[in-house]
Image (cartoon, coloured by chain):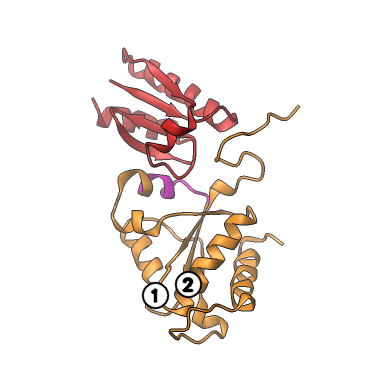
Chain colours: A red, B orange
Amino acid sequence: MDIKVLGPGCKKCKELEKAVHKAVDEIGLDAAVEKVEDMDKITGYNVLMTPGLVINGKVKVFGRVPKHKDIIRYIKEEM
Amino acid sequence: MAESCTCSCSCGRDASEILIFPCSGASNVGQIANQAGVELTKAVVGKMFCLAGIGAHVGSFVESAKGAKRIVAIDGCPVQCAKKTLEHAGVTITDYVVVTEEGIDKNRNLNLAAEDVNKICTKIRASLGIS
């Protein structure tokens, strides 16, 4: 599974990265979480705001840090 | 020491928690709604969001909107396209303004009066409790 956290490095971006790692660990998924900080690359995902969460190339949510249960749901949708 | 923010998520006053959806209709009042959304975004009251993305049921747009603390819908006229679009996607509106209900008549003159845009901005600021 390909998981990317979009965000150039502010508080919320870091919060999302941490939350995604927590969800991945909880599910027991063997997946790398990649942080995308390059604004050109982020823009390429057509998100209006950061942070953003992309799983298997699909933008799941952006502009906020989702709840833990929602991150789990986004990951499971792609399993 | 506060962490400096370099991204578009607005980590200071959290404007990204207030999403603004103007109808952006093809009349003066639709465009007043749109311009009010622009001005409120520029003033960091909230963030203008793509109503068309909601109308298209783009998953990430709908998910992102559903998690916002405040959803501001601005309709130009009583047809209520913004309100109906958001409701159809399951997004709950917290603050709602209809431009024609603020004493502005609907017409086809797209030369907008700044005072009309300001009136709508003031109404939304009051609804949000932001001076």
The N terminus of chain A, quarter of image: top left
Q: Residue furthest left?
A: A79
Tell me: B37 left or right of B26: right
The C terminus of chain A, quarter of image: top left
Residue A32 placement (x, y as % from top left): 36, 15
Q: Is residue B64 one of those drawn in magenta? A: yes
Tell me: A56 left or right of B38: left
Q: Return the residue at label 1.
A: B26
The residue depicted at 41 percent of the width and 20 percent of the height is A34
SS for callout 1: loop
Out of B69 and A52, give the one closest to the viewer: A52
Sequence-earlier tag: 2 or 1: 1
The residue depicted at 39 percent of the width and 15 percent of the height is A25
Tell me: A20 left or right of A75: right
The residue depicted at 42 percent of the width and 68 percent of the height is B23
Residue B89, above or below B78:
above
Residue B123, above or below A17:
below
SS for callout 2: helix
Q: Is residue B51 one of those drawn in magenta? A: no
Asked if one can make out residue B33 in the rendered structure from this viewpoint, the answer is: yes
Q: What amino acid is found at the position of numbered circle 1 in the picture?
A: Ala
Residue B46, above or below A40:
below
Q: Are marks 2 and 1 in contact (CB under 8 Å)?
A: yes
Q: How many marks?
A: 2
**Mark 2 falls within which chain?**
B
Q: Please give the range of residues in magenta.
A: B62-69
- Neighbour class for label 2 at 10 Å: few (<14), some, many (≥20)? many
Q: Return the residue at label 2.
A: B31
Q: Residue furthest right?
A: B1
- Cα gap from disc 2 to disc 1, whole angstroms: 7 Å
- The quarter holding residue A5 reads top left
- The quarter holding residue B11 reads top right
